[in-house]
Image (spheres, rainbow, N blue to C red):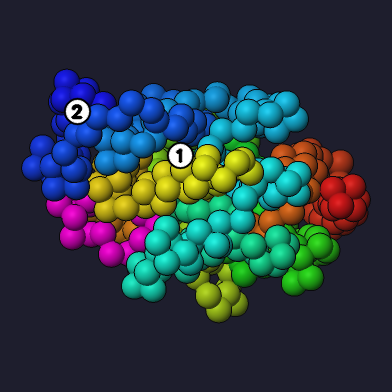
Amino acid sequence: MNLKTSRRTLAKSAAFGVLSTTSFLKYAPAIMAQDSQLAVDYWHRYGGSRAETLNVLAEMFNEIHPEYKVSAISQGDIAESNQKLRAAAAGGGLPAAISADDYDITEYTAAGILTDLDPFVHDPELGFTDEEIAAFLPSQFDRHKLAIYGDRRMAFPQAFSAMSFWWNEDAIKAAGFDKPAETWTEFPDFLRKIVEANPGMTAWMEEDPGARFMSIMKTYGVEWLKDDGVTPNFDAPEALEILTWWKELYDEGLLQFTQSNKIEVFAAGQTAIMLHSSSAGPALAEQVKDFTYNGGLPPQGENTDTLRTETYGSLNAVPTNDEALTKAGWEWVKWLVSPEAFAVWIPASNYFPSRTDLLEIPEIAAFYDADPVALKLLQEVAPAATILSPSAALTEVRGTIVPTAIEEVMMGKYSPEEGVMKMQAESIAAVERAG
């Protein structure tokens, strides 16, 4: 890495508006020449500006660690990256580190692809201090240190997003509300009054009913798997309650299922509310022109004792490789949660930091000062975010079984009672097949 490359890195960082020359020099040591470097490939799924930001981070890391040459390589969408990783596992040539979603971590662990990171986390030289560990949100730090893995730590968080509730402030004020419904019990009448007060507006559109249904179950305080971690929970009374009021809203035209981009529909003022990732903020800031919007924690179940929502976003993991490459993969994954990396990644990605001790970093403080809604979500939504119960069957249950049953109920083929019974029976079979 030469001085010309270093200046190029600084120029790229400045282009993102998140890292000053002074800040970079504070964290990066002098450029060092190195004849031989260990190639460290990091496979991820990001595109656009986030992929460009990862390239910037890789250059920063390489300058700090001249013994390595990290390359951040986009592997396409979820299906493409899964296919490539499995091919690499079968034929050799696994990357040093990967970015993957929660359900992928579970499947990769079952396939024996990943390394237990706990020994690294607690290593005196390569790991974290007790003070550093205490700075992480527990729900993120232990996100994939689970009983299903024999209490091994199979992934490590970088940053994350969560299911959030977005609403059209103008529309709900026209209906006489100064805030949105706080419980799902209130929610149907809340939507009815909004549509009555705003003729021509659709109350709510969903493009992924299976995922949304299971997220809402979580906000009711009910996981899709029972406490034993293997038995589906669609026979819980809360699941029937949700599907019943979904059917009522659907029949009234207040809930519609769409293939359209929900952010674009909401930003155009066509819907009153949106359940979507917290990371939707920048798109809304750019696209919303004619009304005021806000965001916060989704409504909760009437008897929920703990505020809950679903966490999203990729985690980092280290595939099983030789000792040197495994160590290098961990050092990169660890550095991605350092203050200097977060100073770049958080403003560029609009994800929540997994650490709670970073708000005084100038770049992050400036980001949240400029976006009060993002700060509100960080304070209200991030602490409540946890993953869905992990299972190798989750992809099939969420992507096929649950949405198919919902569609059949909405079309009148089954009653809500029959719909949740179908979800339960088919999910039991899926869990058994997945082993």
Q: Specify whether 128 is left or right of 56.
A: right
Callout 1 secondary element? loop
Q: Nearer the viewer, residue 371 or 389?
A: 389
Disc 1 and disc 2 in contact, CB within 8 angstroms: no
Where does the image place residue 208, in percent across and percent down from the top left?
Answer: 62, 39
At label 2, counting other C-alpha atoms closer than 10 Å, the crowd grade (few under 14, some 14-19, many 20 or more) is: some
**Residue located beneath label 2 in the image:** 6
Label 1 or label 2, whichever lies nearer to me, is 2
Image quadrant where residue 126 sits:
bottom left
**Residue located beneath label 1 in the image:** 271
Q: Extreme left residue here?
A: 22
Quadrant placement of the N terminus? top left
| Residue 159 located within the stretch drawn in magenta | no
Q: Which residues are magenta?
A: 352-371
Q: Extreme top residue here?
A: 4
Q: Specify whether 235 is left or right of 297.
A: right
Q: Nearer the viewer, residue 273 or 423?
A: 423
